[in-house]
Image (cartoon, coloured by chain):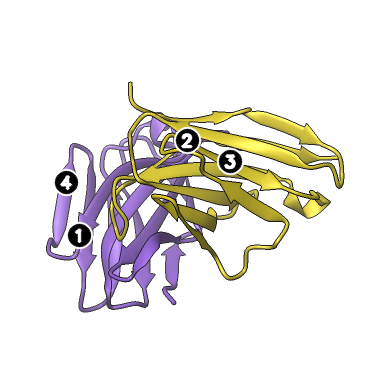
Amino acid sequence: GENVEQHPSTLSVQEGDSAVIKCTYSDSASNYFPWYKQELGKGPQLIIDIRSNVGEKKDQRIAVTLNKTAKHFSLHITETQPEDSAVYFCAAAGTGRRALTFGSGTRLQVQP
Amino acid sequence: DAMVIQNPRYQVTQFGKPVTLSCSQTLNHNVMYWYQQKSSQAPKLLFHYYDKDFNNEADTPDNFQSRRPNTSFCFLDIRSPGLGDAAMYLCATSREDRGREQYFGPGTRLTVT
């Protein structure tokens, strides 16, 4: 089955700096890679996703890049703000597999 | 607004006392999922419904059951909760299977005393 590894497990940045979270996946058939933000006591919220026919996608301060050859994808947050503080999960899904396989999560703390 | 709703948000049950958690959605999505999330861990899929078809994960204990009486509602039944079943239970929906966006509810935090 699919295995998704996520690094780092914790990340602390100063407000205004950039943050990068990286994930690798094992199943070359995976073709959908979402990122979720989870605030304390809440359900995960989809913030951005990318499909395997695209190498990069941006939405304001958030971008995701995908390297299919190396089987890794990354989340980039620019100009971080304290409200970006949360746990971020990457995930992967693909043909023949309905469910998402999640990474282990990254706790991002943005220091004011 | 279209959304995924979970009730209750907090549930306390006694060891061995059956408990039911509920999920409803106004998105008219055909797939509904139940995840278990323990502290500082990723969500773990228990099972999902694709329309009326039930799909159990191989490592989901028999203690966990689910019902989906119609498109909008899905229930998680824990027949005999143990202390190890204390967790956040998340319901999610998607429009189709295989890689479509999943939308999560706020979760139900279950405490077992």
Q: Check chain identity for marks 2 and 4: say if they share one.
A: no
**Residue depth check, mark 1 versus mark 2: number of the one nearer the observer:** 2
Residue carrying label 3 = B75
Quadrant holding the C terminus of chain B: top right
Residue that badge 1 annotates: A51
Q: Are marks 1 and 2 on the same chain?
A: no
Q: Which residue does the image show at 35% across and 32% down from the upper left?
A: A81
Q: Position of residue A67 (x, y in %)?
A: 21, 70
Residue under disc 1 on the same chain as residue under disc 3:
no
Residue A37 position (above or below residue A101): above
Q: Nearer the viewer, mark 2 or mark 4?
A: 2
Secondary element at tag 4 = strand
Chain B drawn colour? yellow
Q: Amino acid at mark 4?
A: Lys
Determine contact: label 1, label 4, CB under 8 Å. Answer: no
Write the residue at 76% across / 49% down: B79
The purple chain is: A
Q: In 3D space, how far apart are the residues under numbered discs 1 and 4 (Cα atoms)?
A: 13 Å
In the picture provided, is A14 more to the left or to the right than A57? right
Density class for disc 2 (Cα within 10 Å; few <14, some 14-19, many ≥20) is many
A46 is higher (above) or lower (below) than A101: above
Q: Tell me where residue A4 appears, x and y as whole percent.
A: 42, 68
> Left or right: where does residue A9 sit relative to residue A16?
right
**In this view of the protein, which residue sits in the foreground, B91 or B69?**
B69
- The three-letter amino acid code for the residue at tag 1 is Arg
Q: Which residue is label 4 attached to?
A: A58
Q: To which residue does mark 2 refer?
A: B105
Q: Secondary structure at mark 1?
A: strand
Please name the residue shown 69% across and 63% down the image.
Answer: B61
